[in-house]
Amino acid sequence: MDTVYGYEYTTGTHLIVTDEDAADFLQSQFTNELRPFEAGRCTYGLWLDVKGKVLADSYALCEGEEAFRLISETSEAAVLTEKLEKHIIADDVEIETAEAVTGFALIGEGLESVLAALGLEIPAAGQFIAKGDLRVFLGRRSDQLNCEVVCLNSAAADAVRDACTVQSVEWADADSITLQRISAGFPQVPVEIGPNDMPGEGGLESDAVSFTKGCYLGQEVVARMHNVGRPQRALFVVSGSDTCPESPIAIYNRETKQVGELRTTVEAKEGWLGVALLKHRFASVGDVLLAGDTELTVERVFRDQKGI
């Protein structure tokens, strides 16, 4: 069997949204298309403020008529709950902050065998599979085939661990998973793209934003940026050979002009890699910049973006 890598985490957001207006309400707040409101549909998207800035991300799992489960590893439940409750006016919507649960990212071409050991299969794009207390959907971790397996209780988590042991899954640490994510071009919300940033600055317009679904909070600003032209800032992959600097930290060019911010860093085989938000008028691929006393090189655009 091809090698499968596993990574265990705890959800940062686990919300249950129900009641008769739940579907239409979430549609009015989420950047991506939730229709048709059919059980088994899984959609990744963003939650914006009125200025179009990125507050959080999540997968939205439609579990039945007017019943949704919102899951994110890295966005905080309190931030999303506050955002949603602030915009409930006359809607019949109930938002329950569910207990944080264990999730497993599984990566590799042998994934089908691991899922089969749990009585599961690889879900179709845009869909999730529910079996008992497991929820399985395609992930955003790697260029390789990868799934998220979310366990709604400890017994389900134990079952996944046991199956991974039997199937000889190799456990990966956070740095290894981060390197795969950076290589694949999936920005982490809200650390690399967050409350001071627009979706287009992280290249998220291509798969986390719908331009045809109708109105949602922040849509007008996002659409304006998309239609007018490229954003002034963009995410880039940067590298260094010195000690890995702490982040976030301001980035300057040789003329001591601030050109951006180093958002995340991770140790690599030779030195370190990072993700930086840069003003691309003043920073280009190949440039050598400074983060404190540390030199870094701009390696590439983090993900394909309009006009960059």
Image (cartoon, rainbow, N blue to C red):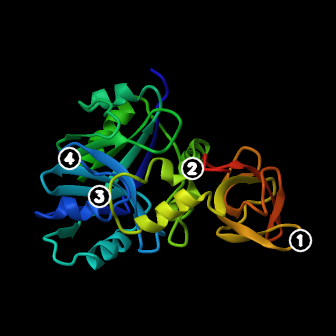
- The reply to whether residue 10 is in sight is no
Q: Is residue 60 left or right of residue 224?
A: left
User: Going from the N terminus, do you reach mark 3 or mark 4 first?
Assistant: 3
Q: Secondary structure at mark 1?
A: loop
Residue 181, label in figure: none
Label annotation for residue 178: 2
Read off the residue under disc 1. Answer: 255
Q: Which one is in front, 76 or 288?
A: 288
Residue 205 located left or right of residue 241: left
Kindly identify which numbered label has been placed on residue 70. 3
Q: Upstream in the sequence, badge 1 or badge 2?
A: 2
For the point 41% across and 68% down, which residue is it?
Answer: 218
Which amino acid does the dot numbered 3 rest on?
Answer: Leu
Tell me which numbered mark, 1 or 3, is placed earlier along the sequence.
3
Circles 1 and 3: CB distance less than 8 Å?
A: no
Q: Residue at x 53, y 57 (%)?
A: 226
Q: Amino acid at mark 2?
A: Thr
Q: Earlier in the sequence, mark 1 or mark 4?
A: 4
Q: Quadrant of residue 67?
A: bottom left
**Cα distance, mark 3 to mark 4?**
15 Å
Give the residue pinned by disc 4.
133
Of the two numbered discs 1 and 3 in the rendering, the one whose residue sits closer to the viewer: 1
Q: Secondary structure at mark 4?
A: loop
Total marks in image:
4
Residue in the foreground of this view, choosing between 160 and 140: 140
Residue at mark 2 to residue at mark 4: CA–CA distance: 27 Å
| C-beta proximity under 8 Å, tags 3 and 4 | no
The location of residue 214, given as percent across then percent down, is 32, 58
- 1 and 4 marks in contact (CB < 8 Å): no
